[in-house]
Image (cartoon, grey):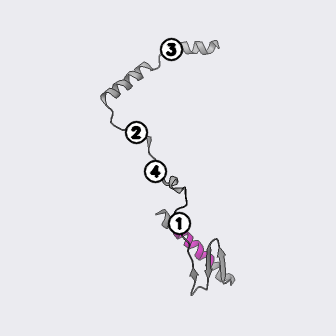
Amino acid sequence: MHVFVKLLLCTAALLSVAVQAEETGGDVIRLDGVTIQGNSENPNVLFVNAWQPPPGTGRLYQGITSFNQHWLTPVSRESLARETHYSKRYVENPERESRLKDILEGE
C-alpha cells in the first residue's frame, strides 16, 4: 500500500514538471535518473525501479513485538507462588524506610 502511494506521488510530481516544461517551451527535462522527452501528445517516460532491495534494509521492516504479549502469557502455579513470595518480601516497610533515611542522612 505504501509503495503504491509513493508511486502515485512520484507520478504526480513528474506530470507537474512536464506541464511546467511545456509552458516554458523546453523539449527535454532531466531529473535524477528520469528523462522526459517529447510533447504533451506523445511523451516518453522512463521509470527506473530497483529489482532488489538495497543491502541492509531488511532490518527496517522487522515487526515490533509488544511487551503486553509478554505480560499476558499464562503463568504456572509455582511461578505465581514464587512471584507472590518475592512481592511480600520486598514490599515497602516503614521500618526499613526510616532506617534507610537514617543511613543516608548520616553520610
- Label annotation for residue 96: 3
Nearest-to-viewer mark from 4 and 1 = 4
| Residue 37, horizontal then vertical, whole percent | 62, 83
Q: Earlier in the sequence, mark 4 or mark 3?
A: 4
Q: Is residue 30 above or below residue 83?
A: below
Estimate the spatial distance between the alpha carbons at disc 3 and disc 1, rounded to whole Å.
Answer: 61 Å
**Magenta residue span:** 5-18
Q: Earlier in the sequence, mark 1 or mark 2?
A: 1
At horizontal 39% and vertical 37% (from top left) the residue drawn is: 71
Q: Is residue 98 above or below residue 45?
A: above
Task: Give yes or no for contact between labels 2 and 3 (Cβ–Cβ under 8 Å).
Answer: no
- Label annotation for residue 15: none
Q: Earlier in the sequence, mark 2 or mark 4?
A: 4
Q: Residues within 10 Å of mark 2 (few under 14, many from 20)?
A: few
Local SS, label 4 = loop
Task: Give yes or no for contact between labels 1 and 2 (Cβ–Cβ under 8 Å).
Answer: no
- Label annotation for residue 6: 1
At horizontal 48% and vertical 67% (from top left) the residue drawn is: 4
Nearest-to-viewer mark from 4 and 3 = 4
| Residue 73, horizontal then vertical, whole percent | 35, 38
Nearest-to-viewer mark from 1 and 2 = 2
Q: Is residue 36 above or below residue 71?
A: below
Could you tell me which quadrant the C terminus lies in? top right
At horizontal 33% and vertical 36% (from top left) the residue drawn is: 74
- Label annotation for residue 63: 4
Mark 3 belongs to which amino acid? Arg
Task: Give yes or no for contact between labels 4 and 1 (Cβ–Cβ under 8 Å).
Answer: no
Name of the residue lying farthest toward the bottom: 41
Please name the residue that numbered disc 2 is placed on.
70
